Amino acid sequence: MTDYSQIDFSELIAFSVDEVVTHSYVRDVPLKSGKTLALITLDNDRDHTRPSTLGPVTLVEYGEVLDALRQRAAKGEIDAVAVTGKPFILAAGADLSKVGEVSSHAMAKQMAQLGHYVLTKLGETGVPSFAFINGLALGGGVEIGLAADYRTVDSSIPALALPEVFLGIIPGWGGACLLPNLIGIENALKVIIENPLKNNRTLKGKDVLELGIADAMFSSANFLEESLTWADGVLDGSITVKRPNAPGKVERLVKWDAAVGIARKMLESRIGTVAKSPYAALDLLKAAKSGTKEEGFAREDDALADLVAGDQFRASIYAFNLVQKRAKRPAGAPDKKLAKPVTKVGVIGAGLMASQFALLFVRQLKVPVVITDLDQGRVDKGLDYIRGEIAGLLEKGRISSDESNRLNALISGTTDKADFADADWVIEAVFEELGVKQAVFADVEQYISDTAVLATNTSSLSVEQIGANLKHPERVVGFHFFNPVAVMPLVEVVNTPLTDDATLSTAMVVAAKLRKNAVITRDTPGFVVNRILAKLLGEAMHAVDTGTPFEVVDTALAPFGLPMTSFELLELVGLKVGAHVLDTHHAAFPDRFFESQNLHKLAEHGKIFERDAKGKIKGFDKTAVKIVSGGTTPMTGDEILRRVEDGLADEIHRMLEDDVVHAAEDIDLCLILGAGWPFQMGGATPYLDRVGASERVFGDTFHHPRIAGVS
């Protein structure tokens, strides 16, 4: 086994000279029993606004403090050691911006080794060790706790999680080895793999206790005092710690490999096999059922080094920075002070999409929302849906009964457009046809004020044309949601040549209040997401139409790592909708987008796949296969992949030259938030740079200099 104490970490330390150091402050706490506990508090007091992070300099200092405490324990000066954090934060793990700059495999391995070397010292002081999880604990912050003998948790912590798999790496400072041996393999699979892949789901204090990550839970008011009292009880033997979730012989012999096997099959069906980190984590979890802790750490060292030095992690950091930084400061957004107040919302339409809008607006804006449709029956159906959803939220405990009553009181329906007279924001969600949308806006304009904003949820029509016949086209803006409305975080805000800054600013402020990330796009067919998906799906249908089997197309496009295949996506959005989107793009760009009569025939048939009673895909539908048969020039998988890569590189390059959005980063942000493009791919443009499509198509790259993860 590697002797970590013999490794020279000086290069890693030199690399981290600009680190915001989280210091380890120690004080002795006398316990009621007469024993003494040395309490370490982690605090980056140079920057109180920043969560404590664990860089190399921080780790070295923490290790030195633990070494000193080990010497004191040997002298009998202390009876226990504990670690906690500054108010509300234990530690947010490694500084990802710094880790993302690591380029060599050797340095990446040293980062893993240093973490193992230092964190393990907490359990090697010669006296019992405790972690008091007083607040946010992510990644390495959780692994600090796992290194202790015992753990307590604050009942109101904002989050505890091991999010590494989401970012293209693995818990590499003991998490993949220690956690399954603490809480069992099934629970560990949930925390390390399942939760990160569910949009980084996190654990609250109650979850941490129930899973067995913590041995006791206390309220915020007296968390430290009660944790110290509890630790004293453990020390004097009056408290016995039981861990019912810790794996026994039967679990290791029978359940362990079976659980990992089931998880592997679920991963393959859900995300394919392109993303490396979930499978690396799965291998580590499988191996953790036996062997020594040191062997587990060595496996983590190698796995983390391979991933940190690889393309997918660096692409993930690029994607992470887009979502955490660029999304918070949208390019091209006017001054927020120009935004008009929104005190009432009108929704034209009462179908499913419109009802989802109404529910979102009333929940987040907490203003009156009125829906309308052609007849009272449709209005009532929409109101029933909204009220049913509110009842569901109440039943699940996500809102209080008072909140439920308030929301129900704010929702109303009408067939009389005069009820829209005092609405400041009116959004339509009617049939995707230009004439229909023009008509409903022309009708409602008679009743609303001259300053009210008119927003359209069109996915591919010209927003300017929708408002072309209005008296005030300057107050029309595109506001394109993605389905399901409550879940998808993106809104494309479409700025027409006539849209004024007050309207655009209002749209951006409303999006923020709805807790959506907004990207401003020019008024062009498909805007961003649908234009790129139309290119991808159009090429897939073209390949099928010319004689390539469905299976070959699906397999060929697997390297994109998308959450579903092209034809699964077509079924999800609806075959009729997909055909309409392709037709719209073919009409706008006939030289680059294919029309597919077969897709219209598939839409009439209603499906591409044969599914079982639970909706699981059994194979391609025989009638669907027959519908697309007849092509005489099939392509190979490699030919299809190259066509799609080059086609996307060309289309995105054209979009940037036409200033559809401000930068390649905005394209990727839209795809990550609106199309589920995987973090490990970093969006489309890093992938296209990485595989050489950008160079092939326009002799350059999307990113200068080539960013980490792009090549």
Image (cartoon, rainbow, N blue to C red):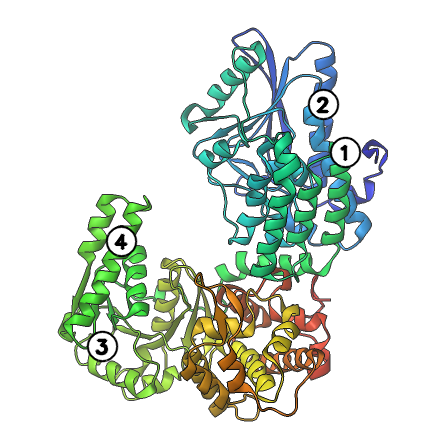
| Quadrant of the drawing holding the N terminus | top right
First-in-chain label (3 vs 4): 4
Disc number lying in front (2 or 4):
4
Rendered position, 600 above or below 341: below
What residue is disc 3 on? 450
Q: Secondary structure at mark 4?
A: helix
Say if residue 499 shows up in the picture: yes
Between label 2 and label 3, give the one nearer the viewer.
2
Q: In the rendered image, which residue does mark 1 sit on?
A: 294
Q: Are marks 1 and 4 in contact (CB under 8 Å)?
A: no
Q: Secondary structure at mark 1?
A: helix
CA distance separating discs 1 and 4 = 52 Å
Q: Type of residue at label 1?
A: Glu
Instruction: Please name the amino acid that badge 2 sits on.
Output: Glu
Q: Indicate which disc, 1 or 2, sits on the residue closer to the N terminus.
A: 2
Q: Nearer the viewer, residue 597 or 476?
A: 597
**Which mark is first along the chain, 3 or 1?**
1
Q: Which dot marks residue 621?
A: none
> Residue 131 at x, y = what percent?
58, 27
Is the residue marked by circle 1 packed among few (<14), some (14-19), or many (20+) residues within 10 Å? some
Going 60% across and 67% down the picture, which residue do you hit?
A: 683
Measured Cα–Cα span from mark 2 to mark 4: 52 Å
- Can you say whether 326 is above or below 415 in the image? above
Q: Which residue is mark 4?
A: 390
Quadrant (top left, top right, bottom left, bottom right) of the C terminus:
bottom right
Q: Which image quadrant is residue 71 in? A: top right
Helix, strand or loop at label 2? It is helix
Residue at x-position 54% and y-position 69%: 666
